[in-house]
Image (cartoon, helix red, strand yellow):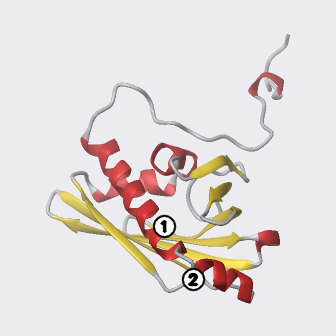
Amino acid sequence: MNPVRAHVTISAPREQVFDLIADLSARPAWCGHYQRDYHLTRPRASGKGAGARFMVKTLLARTWVELVISEAAAPGLLREQLRLSRLGRTPGFSEYELTPLGRATRVELTFWTEPATRLDAFKEALGARRSVRRKLRKSLKRLRAIFEEQGDKPLERATIAGYEPAKAARFGSTA
């Protein structure tokens, strides 16, 4: 798929916006409308090496996506590597560029994939590009709302897959 781009201007400092984007545990708060069964794959939730897995429902099927942050150059650039489709055969990439605009920040998101098979390329040709663009624009609008509309409830957060706090080891406790 050719690169799909979306952008938004957020009235917040670039450092704060970068911190939220680089924290994968906070992604369900602004990308939850199209990412289902979202969970972290590693204990590290932010910065280089952090990973997550989720399902995206597309026009023809459901697709599992594995995401790993490959480069985090604070506060201006965040690159992610994606593995999509069955057995992660389709590589994908996303890149967030944050540019200061006075007291605001312009966030530009670029997403693209390289279909591994002809079937994957055919599925993408059936309207995946428009669908992806619409989902990315909506997620960036939700990101802007997090900073500009002060909500009274905390952000939705993801946890590590299979982690149960009630059964976790309690180091230092004597009971």
Q: Which residue is drawn at 63% across and 57% down?
A: 57
> Residue at label 2?
125
The three-letter amino acid code for the residue at tag 2 is Ala
Given residues 49 and 86, the one toward you in this image is 86
Say which quadrant the C terminus sits in.
Answer: top right
Residue found 66% across the figure and 40% down from its top:
159
The residue positioned farthest toward the bottom in the image shown: 118
In the rendered image, the quadrant that contains the N terminus is bottom right
Q: Is mark 2 on a helix, strand or loop?
A: helix
Callout 2: few (<14), some (14-19), or many (20+) C-alpha neighbours within 10 Å? few
Question: Which residue occupies the foreground of this view, 137 or 100?
Answer: 137
Residue for badge 1: 131
Q: Which amino acid does label 1 sit on?
A: Ser
Please give left or right for residue 45 compared with residue 118 in the image: left
Distance, label 2 to label 1, CA atoms, is 11 Å
Query: Is 69 left or right of 18, judged from the image as shown?
Result: right
Viewer-side residue, 85 vs 103: 85
| 34 w.r.t. 169: above or below | below
Residue 16 visible here: no
Residue 77: image location, x then y, percent: 42, 71
Upstream in sequence: badge 2 or badge 1: 2
